[in-house]
Amino acid sequence: MKKVLVLCTGNSCRSIMAEAMINQLGEGRYTAVSAGSEPAGYVHPGSIAALQRHGFGVGEPRSKSWDEFADQAFDIVITVCDRAATESCPVFIGNVAKKHWSTPDPASVQGSEEEVAKAFDNALTLLRDRIEKELP
């Protein structure tokens, strides 16, 4: 089973959604965790709601620092925000494949509840499509 680390800056939206989807869609082939360079300390409720709307299990996600995983080996490290992709990441042990899946931040969307929910759904769809295409 391949180990995947999904990185974002705040680890409150996109990386949380990607972690849940990789664990469900890649069950038996991949196991994922997520973290951030500057963890927000909370999981955005919009992420949880989007996962539930699309039939994904949520589990008990939490926002955490990438330092928590610095001494672990991963097969794949995926960044989902442009900021995290350009930051100095901790060194991960072993031969690590790096991927960057630029995904707009749904938490930055202003507007009605419907507009915000649509932004989370769009981010989830982008991530799900990448997972299905690149993590067979």
Image (cartoon, rainbow, N blue to C red):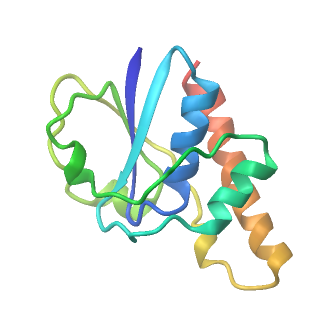
Question: Is 21 left or right of 5, judged from the image as shown?
Answer: right
Q: Quadrant of the C terminus?
A: top right
Is the residue 133 above or below the residue 80 in the image?
A: above
Q: Nearer the viewer, residue 93 or 65?
A: 65
Occupied quadrant, residue 46 = bottom right
Question: Is 86 left or right of 91, judged from the image as shown?
Answer: right
Q: Nearer the viewer, residue 4 or 134?
A: 4
Q: Residue 40, percent across and down?
A: 40, 71
Q: Residue 134, percent across and down?
A: 56, 27
Q: Which residue appears farthest toward the right when viewing the image?
A: 114
Is the residue 74 above or below the residue 101 in the image?
A: above
The answer to whether residue 136 is seen in the rendering is yes
Occupied quadrant, residue 95 = top left
Query: Residue, x 73% and y 66% (percent of image)?
Result: 119
Q: Which residue appears farthest toward the bottom when viewing the image?
A: 111
Query: Residue, x 60% and y 73% (percent of image)?
Result: 107
The answer to whether residue 89 is seen in the rendering is no
